[in-house]
Amino acid sequence: SDVLLALALTPLLLVRQPDQVWIVFVVSFVSGCLEQFFAPAESALLPSLVPEDLLVSANALGGVNSNTARLVGPALGGLVMAWVGLPGVVVGDGVSFLLAALMIALISVSGRAASAPAPAVAPATGAVVAGGAPNSGASNPGASNPGTPWGGIWHAWLDGVRLVPRRPLSIVFVATAITSFGEGLFGVLLVVFVYVVLRGGALQLGWLMSGQAVGGLLGGLVIGWIGRRFRPARLYAVGMLLFGLLDLIIVNAPGLLPPIARMVVPGAAVPVLFVVIGLFVVVGIPGAASQAGFNTLVQTAVPDRYLGRVFGLLMAVMSLMALGGMVLAGGLGDQVGPVPLLNIQGGGYVVAGLIALAALGAGTRWARPSSAPERAAVSDQSGVSALSGQ
């Protein structure tokens, strides 16, 4: 994926005039498609490199990397753009992908770190096979033919889908759908919020985005340090709940803080913009907690051979629901305004956090047993395997 992403950037070298902006759209589309392969593979690879008791910290430190890039990347890109123009930015970005591909190629993977092989659910039949060796699936006449490349892909995808109805995955999918819809709203309306509500511009938007990156960086360091003390389900649920509550405060602060301050001190002026920037920093901490808990929860609940498929399904849900949020924001944003719609985003996180807290249990450990005999599996009458949460 990294090599293909580097190649996908090369058409940007042809962009010289504003009427060639369609090339940017095509490159963005192709890059977005390729990233759908990279991200699930990245999340599926981590449990093979890190012992299970360090997964929360490892996922949190991955967030530190991302937020460091969010801070450094725009500034570095601006310098390169000013120095050598767009071609220099494209070449530098392409080289970064190739260096990442080289580092990934040097990784040696031998299976889940410090754990015995988990049993696999045989494709199409639902039978649990010790050591991860699947049955042929021939007993299921409705199964796709795995002998052809596309049949094998469809067959493998269905095997991942069959795990989704079981806890904790079903809860994660519901919460992901709710929060992704809100993220679609946020992606469209953040700029409108800054321009209309905060009376700011590009500079103020940059401050907010930098504040969010700083918060994510601090949150990743904190969770990386203390993450082993908390269950992934607790981090995931409580992180979403606090993130949503802080989002609601951020969205409504510009309208509520000035009148409240004037009630306390007549004529008082509140630096609303700087209050919101501070809240953007703070919200990064529960955001990092929920993301680390989310990744670890899935990684410990799904056998290695299905991780890529399940993460791929989750990304598909994220993209579809975010698209729905973007459509709603575009259709109603001018009529309703950004604040009511952004309240939907914050409220969605609160609802998702409460659902996860109630359904998963704050102290439940949805972890994979260390050996095959300890792992329970049941098959329903249709032959679909269901992994039981331990």
Image (tube, rainbow, N blue to C red):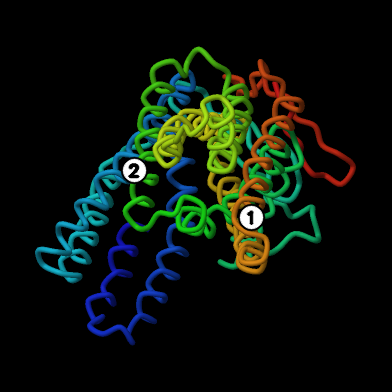
Give the left or right position of residue 86, taking residue 238 as reference.
left
Which residue sits at x=64%, y=55%? 157
Q: In the displayed image of the protein, which residue is found farthest to the front?
A: 266
Mark 2 crowdedness (10 Å alpha carbons): few <14, some 14-19, many ≥20: many
**Across the whole image, how many numbered discs are drawn on residues?**
2
Identity, as a three-letter code, of the amino acid under mark 2: Ser
Between label 1 and label 2, give the one nearer the viewer: 2
The tag earlier along the polypeptide, 1 or 2, is: 1
User: Which residue has dot 1 on it?
Assistant: 157
Classify mark 1: helix, strand or loop: helix
Image vertical order of residue 246 relative to residue 334, above or below: above
The numbered dot on residue 210 is: 2
The numbered dot on residue 215 is: none
- Give the percent coordinates (x, y) of residue 312: 56, 51
Which residue sits at x=69%, y=49%? 161
Image vertical order of residue 218 relative to residue 78, above or below: above
